[in-house]
Amino acid sequence: MLTQNVALGSRSYDVLIGHNILDQLVGVLKNLNAEQRSVTIITEDTVANLYLEKIKSLLESTDYQVNILILPAGESTKSLENYERCMHFCLQHNVERNHALIALGGGVIGDLTGFVAATLRRGCRFIQVPTTLLAQVDSSVGGKTAINCQYGKNLIGAFYQPSAVLIDVNFLGTLSKRVYRSGYAEVIKYGLLGDKEFFNYLAQNNDLFLNQDIEFLIKIIAHCVEMKANIVSRDETEKGERALLNLGHTFAHAYEAETGYSDTLHHGEAVALGMLNAAQFSSFQGHLNTNIVDNIENVLFAAGFNLNIIYYISDLNIDNILKHMMQDKKVSNYRLSLILLKDIGHSFIQPDSCIKELREFFTLNN
Ligand code: NAD
Ligand code: GLY
């Protein structure tokens, strides 16, 4: 088992990474509070069907009393309605500040449970047990918690760190190919934004990704978590460098908004499209060589991503896309920041991206 610390002073915590390490959960809970014998799991139906019984037995056999809330699976679960449902469930079960909530699921459950933990009695503890590749390499680490609303994605939320993260690659064995691949977009993102050697390693080992090789998965997850832990330690609340982790996301969130956050387009698929757009727009503005754009496209394509936006949105409306992009959290004084590339592994923040040029770019590319 590997351990990566996220160094944030009194809010520091460990991320445990390994294969078949679920039983470490008991030790993690005892470390947090040796006296506490009550724990609350928030999960969703797909994950519950596969893993809940095992986790519940593990906790009950070590004398924990377990409260369980099972929500529907899917992005629409990150809603105000479900937030209210979680809060009322926790209050009804007398969850105290130093009780631990366990977020058992992908990014949807992690983001929602984290936001519940951030606001329940002004903050209670929570442990992330991420069950998708996306959640293991990205969303479970770093303390971004949020829900969606009619105005857009992740617009209601808080920076609130978990007390521990337990990453067991065993969970990945039951993911659909599509969901597994979606998570890989975030893995490729780390190479693109800041580590060319890692990007080349991924490009050369696509077969290990496709075959879900356990050693490979542990290695790449640990690498992404290490990169993220370092960035978050330096810039927890995204005043600067952390924004680089949003490479491709401004485009991605616009596509997701346009498809109604539905199953039509998964977050990771949108990120793959968005990263390619960021590379293409970087090239359009003269920052990036076109053969590097081709290289990025080839790596995403080899991983199995469909990179034609028309496949997901048959009647792309550029005005709508630009409108969604202007809802981005990085917009300040009506100015849009974009994360662009000078090379693979060399990303930068362009603070005042020109909407007129973006319109031209979309018109040329669609
Ligand atoms: P998700 O949680 O919806 O999971 C995707 C699908 O996989 C769901 O259908 C789920 O039921 C299923 N699933 C989960 N674990 C499984 C398992 N082990 N076996 C079989 N099926 C399983 O989505 P996601 O892709 O994990 O996360 C996307 C969310 O994460 C988005 O809401 C996005 O905004 C958020 N996100 C947050 C951050 C952050 O820093 N907080 C970063 C990236 C993404
Ligand atoms: N997923 C982007 C971040 O955590 O900052």
Image (cartoon, helix red, strand yellow):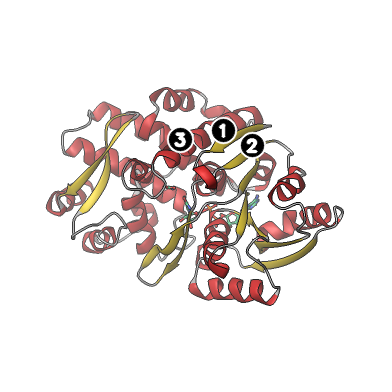
Q: Quadrant of residue 255?
A: bottom left
Image quadrant containing the N terminus: top right
Q: Pointer 1: what residue?
A: 222
Q: Nearer the viewer, residue 228 or 14?
A: 14
Q: Earlier in the sequence, mark 2 or mark 1?
A: 2
Up/down of 152 relative to 202, above or below: below
Q: Pointer 2: what residue?
A: 17
Q: Is residue 46 left or right of residue 160?
A: right
Q: Amino acid at mark 1?
A: Ala
Q: Amino acid at mark 3?
A: Asn
Callout 2: SS = strand
Up/down of 223 relative to 45, above or below: above
For the residues carrying marks 1 and 3, which lies nearer the camera in this image? 3
Callout 1: SS = helix
Callout 2 crowding tier (Cα within 10 Å): few <14, some 14–19, many ≥20: many
Q: Pointer 3: what residue?
A: 230
Q: Nearer the viewer, residue 298 or 321?
A: 321
Up/down of 200 relative to 187, above or below: above
Q: Image point 76% across, 51% down: which residue?
A: 34
In percent of width and height, residue 346 lies at: 31, 30
Q: Amino acid at mark 2?
A: Ile
Q: Image point 56% across, 56% down: which residue?
A: 110
In percent of width and height, residue 33 lies at: 71, 53
Disc 1 versus disc 3: distance between alpha carbons?
Answer: 12 Å
